[in-house]
Image (tube, coloured by chain):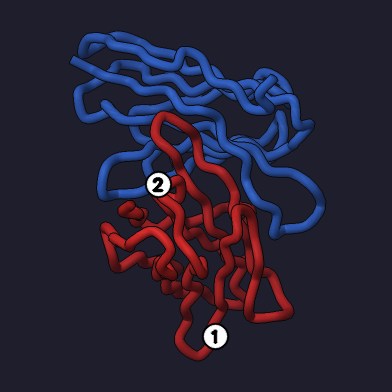
Amino acid sequence: DADVTQTPRNRITKTGKRIMLECSQTKGHDRMYWYRQDPGLGLRLIYYSFDVKDINKGEISDGYSVSRQAQAKFSLSLESAIPNQTALYFCATSGGTGSYNEQFFGPGTRLTVL
Amino acid sequence: AQSVAQPEDQVNVAEGNPLTVKCTYSVSGNPYLFWYVQYPNRGLQFLLKYITGDNLVKGSYGFEAEFNKSQTSFHLKKPSALVSDSALYFCAVRVSGTYKYIFGTGTRLKVLA
């Protein structure tokens, strides 16, 4: 089974709808991240969490919110989706006491907002 | 500001030839640098990292990267490219004093048979 899973894998929705993307991990990592990927822009950080009680905004948090329900679960919500939120969304985790540990990524959620 | 640059959107190389995918960085403090690969319809996979020590770092699938402090570069290399190496490659740097990472815009590698 995959260490980092994301649901749904694909979603088409309409402008103004509320959408939730879910991420679960079995790696036991404390740190979890949400990124969006757009062609030519690479990955940009939306939100990150270093433990259940810690939530931080990334560089493009406007229009998004998150919830860390447990160490293993980190959800991303679009309160009122708009077309420029059409993108590929990735959840990632990292862990360990070293500050140089690599991240592990989920398979991604392709979101289309019409 | 801390940043990562991948100056080439796409790199084409013939199978069997050596490949290089370029990355330059700007950070304060010691750089922690990473390379990831993304295959179609997949998430990013970790290839290798530079933390300290030898400037030549070896990673997965025969890839290696050379850290050059004076040129602030961390280029990804492979002596002999395979068609299966065709993918999107991302360079990333850890933001000093945090657990956040900045990613480059990605370089698409095409290995031609």
Q: Identify residue for label 2.
A: B87
Q: Residue at x 63, y 27 (%)?
A: A4
- Looking at the picture, do discs 1 and 2 lie on one chain? yes
Q: Is residue B55 left or right of residue A57?
A: right
Residue type marked 2? Ala
Q: Is residue A44 above or below residue B74?
A: above
Q: Nearer the viewer, residue B67 or B78?
A: B78
Give the chain coloured blue. A
Left or right of B59 on screen, residue A78: left
Q: Is residue A76 above or below residue B112?
A: above
Output the chain of dot 2.
B
Please tell me which residue lies in front, A22 or A59: A22
Q: Secondary structure at mark 2?
A: strand
Q: Which chain appears red?
A: B
The residue that disc 1 covers is: B69
Q: Label 1's element?
A: loop
Q: Give me the residue at 62% from left, 40% from top.
A: A104
Instruction: Answer with left or right where residue B1 lies relative to residue A66.
Output: left
Earlier sequence position, callout 1 versus callout 2: 1
Residue B87 spot, x, y in % from top left: 40, 46
Q: Quadrant of the N terminus of chain B?
A: bottom left
Between the residue at mark 1 and the residue at mark 2, the CA separation in whole angstroms equals: 27 Å
